[in-house]
Image (spheres, rainbow, N blue to C red):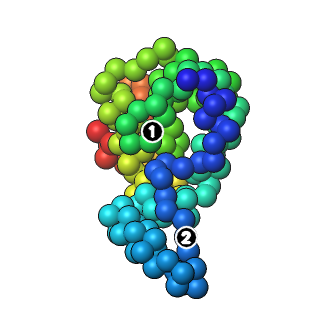
Amino acid sequence: MPIDMLLDAPYSFRPVPGVRRAAECLGDPSECATDAISCAGDPFGCTYSWRAPFTIALEQAFRRLSDGNAVPLEGGITLITDCKGICELVQAPAFAIGHTIFTTQPGLQSDTIRHEKEHVRQYEIMGDTFWGPWLASGGASVIGCFAVKAFGGDYGDCLHDTNILEILAR
């Protein structure tokens, strides 16, 4: 599926029921009850757009400034393979922003997809608060990685491997 087709639709991870004011529910209370039951069954999906405006905007920016093959995955996740454009600036085999997994490769191994889906789950639960621990842990990782290198260790993927959200996504 071309990535352009995804950009035309309004963002939605899951079909989220519309928010209704109490006065609107007086006309047809059954619809409001159905909305409330749907949200009770999936409070994270129901409130994601309110809890993650920065993440959604960043995800949309990356989608607009990238080109590739969009592959829909279960749970409303999109995998963009053969990604060209801004996604090439991220020096990683794959990365997730919100509910989109980007890779410059033609495909990913199942363990990498599973790892990136775990990041999608972290975004879903944490919303925009994901970025605080990710950045803070990244800062701590930089210090730790310089220490590893100073003592002759292999720097390799040290920044990635010592980030707390990366460790939790394993």
Residue at 55% across / 23% down in the picture? 1
**Quarter-of-image position of residue 2:** top right
The disc labelled 2 sits on which kind of residue?
Val
Whole-angstrom CA distance, mark 1 to mark 2, is 23 Å
Q: Is residue 162 visible?
A: no
Q: Position of residue 131 (x, y in %)?
A: 52, 54
Q: Are marks 1 and 2 in contact (CB under 8 Å)?
A: no
Which is more toward the observer, 157 or 17?
Answer: 17
Left/right placement of residue 20 relative to residue 40 reads: right
Pointer 1 local density, CA inside 10 Å: few below 14, some 14–19, many at least 20: some
Closer to the chain start, of discs 1 and 2, is 2
Q: Position of residue 88 (x, y in %)?
A: 62, 24
The image quarter containing residue 150 is top left
Vertical arrangement, residue 93 with respect to residue 14, above or below: above
Q: Which residue is mark 2?
A: 19
Observer-nearest of 163 and 27: 27
The x, y position of residue 23, in whole percent, is 58, 85
Check disc 2 and report its element: helix, strand or loop: loop
Disc 1 residue type?
Ile
Report if residue 87 is visible in the image: yes
Could you say which is closer to the camera, residue 89 or residue 124? Answer: 124
Nearer to us in this view, 46 or 109: 46
Residue 146: percent from left, percent from top = 47, 37
Q: Residue at x 55, y 70 (%)?
A: 19
To which residue does mark 1 refer? 77
